[in-house]
Image (cartoon, rainbow, N blue to C red):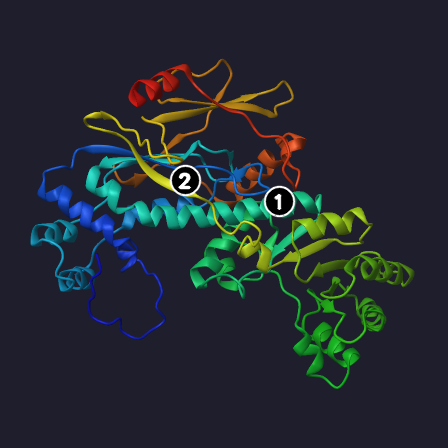
Amino acid sequence: MAVSGPAASPGFGYVTPDNVALLVDLYELAMADSYLRNGMNGRATFALFVRSLPPSREFLVSAGIETALACLETLRFGDEAIRYLRGLHLFSEQFLEYLRDFRFTGDARAVPEGEVFFPPEPLLEISAPRIEAQIVETLLLNTLNFQVMVASKAARSVLAARGRGVVDFSPRRDHGADAALKAARAAYIAGCTGTSNVLAGMLYGIPVVGTMAHSYIMSFSDELEAFRAFARDFPTNTVLLIDTYDTMQGVANAITVGGEMASAGARLRGVRIDSGDLTAQSRAVRAALDAAGLRETQIFLSGDLNEYRIAEMLAQGAAADAFGVGTELGTSADAPSVGGVYKLVEDEKGYRIKLSTGKATLPGRKQVWRRHDPEGQPSGDLLALHDEPGPPGATPMLIPVMQAGRRILSESLVEIRQRCTERLVALPEELKHLDDGAAYHVALSPGLTALRERMRA
């Protein structure tokens, strides 16, 4: 089905609250129109879940739920959207009038942001009139797949850093302006200490972090002059980039400035190295700083970093207080997608199941029960029907987050981030490995197993 409409007007070409309702695959609207014409708008439940873990991943981090719920709560088809859809000469007037008054009125249950989850557990379940639940599929998948991907990648860097800071340096390499904002938020949930993205700092309250570029150093007659100017202009946040010409000469100049700052009652906060053998250079720079009495001056490493390089450098004795991770974080370069899907599992006629080869689904609304060992570590999950009782002492992972189209869960980003920090600490060690380790066990309950087999038959 190929259709065309009026050419897009010039501009930035970004998603806004006024046009986000059209962030939908065409076939969602075509199906919804057909449902309306055929009187099929009874209550239905869709489950959003990830079929399998990406390569080298042992867990996923829930992220993007708040963003998704905010979109559902405010989703509207405005006059411009209706005019565009009418111009496609595809949809019935009955459907266009339905969209004019569209409001999402459904319920949602979700794994809270910052929690660790595993396939094939539902991350989100939507129960709503069928048309409403169908129309929001693309928006929900776009929102959650991306943020889960970035949060899960960032969590690996945070674990690899072993308590040292990790900063999101990704916006210049992220796949679009909206992606840069959501990447900063997801990375902060996963434990990153800040972002270089100033807009994300304003919108989400994330600490913003920055130093200087090589172009700044090159703009002055020499490196020492540049360092002095920066220290004079930003005496409370002086972090000097020392590898523009020669790293050891750079640290010598930084030490000179650090001494001058100390005499004026200020402090050289840190130095950054962005190229070369970061491990060897960081150790030499640490020794030089310590010998000069600048033991509190931190070393910040950046330059094409990821969790593997961070772990390798620390294993080799790198002297680092924090890391800036950019491209690899914002694009999750080694696993750039999460295969989240959104499937019908139940409607007013009963349970629903898909039996396609390699893409079969589990029927019915569900609950995930998490067991813990005596030390508090997760020891296995039970995926059950929503009304099955859980094992003694197990924790339900899916909680109500939206009722009748209104959010009923309100959490700060700080609270979400703290939850993620606690969950990562509690992970079994074998799940923290950067390469494939032990698989976490997700079992199906007797009731769910019996229902699946009965429907297959």
Q: Is residue 87 above or below residue 373?
A: below
Q: How many marks?
A: 2
Comparing 400 with 44, the one in front is 44
Taking the image as shown, residue 97 lies to the left or right of residue 14, namely: left
Indicate which disc, 2 or 1, sits on the residue closer to the N terminus.
1
Residue 410 — which label?
Answer: 2
Disc 2 residue type? Ser
Q: Callout 1: helix, strand or loop?
A: helix
Rendered residue at 38%/50% (across/down): 142
Give how far across and how far down residue 313 sits, in percent: 76, 52
The residue labelled by disc 1 is 156
Split into 4 quadrants, where in the image is the C terminus? top left
The image position of residue 63, as x and y in percent, is 47, 44
Q: Report the residue at 25% width, 37% height from top.
A: 106
Residue shown at 15%/47% (left/top)? 33
Q: Amino acid at mark 1?
A: Arg
Q: Give 321 or 261, whichever is nearer the viewer.
A: 321
Of residues 270 and 389, which is closer to you in this image?
389
| Residue 377, position as x, y percentages in the image | 61, 25
